[in-house]
Amino acid sequence: MAAKQIIFDQGTNTMKTMVFKRVTCWCSVLILGFLMGCAAPQKPLYSWGSYQKEIYAYFKNTQSSPTEQIIALEQQEQKAKAQGLAVPPGFHAHLGMLYANSGQIDKVQQQFEIEKQLYPESTTYMDFLLLNLNKK
């Protein structure tokens, strides 16, 4: 009888240990999930705003004129600055193209230069566009 009691006690301890490990594991998962849920969301890298909509409108030749698109993009740029966010790559290049379509050549050069400064990987293309702009 004593042998059966010892085996039964060992089985109970093993069972208690397994239950304890499972409870500890689930508590750890819940605490970790809670802490991850409390983490502050990351600030976005760029302020996209209406930029994608304006590009789509430009390439679809909708009724909005280059001047209307320029105004929308300039407003988006001001909102991005107010939020402390950068405008996305290509923003100033597209704004420059809109200025070219409206005949404001001095602003085209200014926007292409800003694009080159903000995104150096665009330098080759911006230089190409500036060279072709100066040929006209």
Image (cartoon, grey):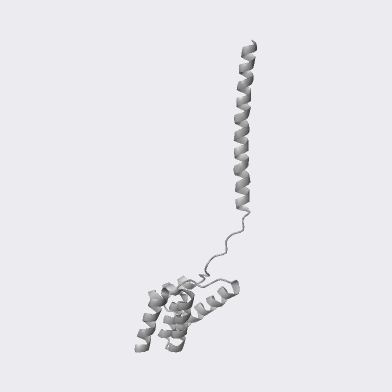
Point 59% across, 43% down: residue: 29
Of all residues, the one furthest to the top in this rendering is: 1
Visible in this render: residue 61?
A: no
Which quadrant holds residue 42? bottom right
Point 62% across, 29% down: residue: 17
How far across and how far down the image is residue 123, in percent? 41, 77
How far across and how far down the image is residue 131, in percent? 36, 84
Please state, as top left, top right, bottom left or bottom right, where the C terminus lies in the image.
Answer: bottom left
How many dots with numbers? Answer: 0
How far across and how far down the image is residue 126, in percent? 40, 79
Please state, as top left, top right, bottom left or bottom right, where the N terminus lies in the image.
Answer: top right
Q: Is residue 64 left or right of residue 45?
A: left
Point 62% across, 36% down: residue: 23
Visible in this render: residue 9?
A: yes
The foreground one among 61 and 98 is 98
Q: Is residue 32 above or below residue 67?
A: above
Q: Is residue 19 left or right of residue 57?
A: right
Q: Is residue 100 left or right of residue 78?
A: left
Point 56% across, 73% down: residue: 80
How far across and how far down the image is residue 87, in percent? 51, 73
Which quadrant holds residue 79? bottom right
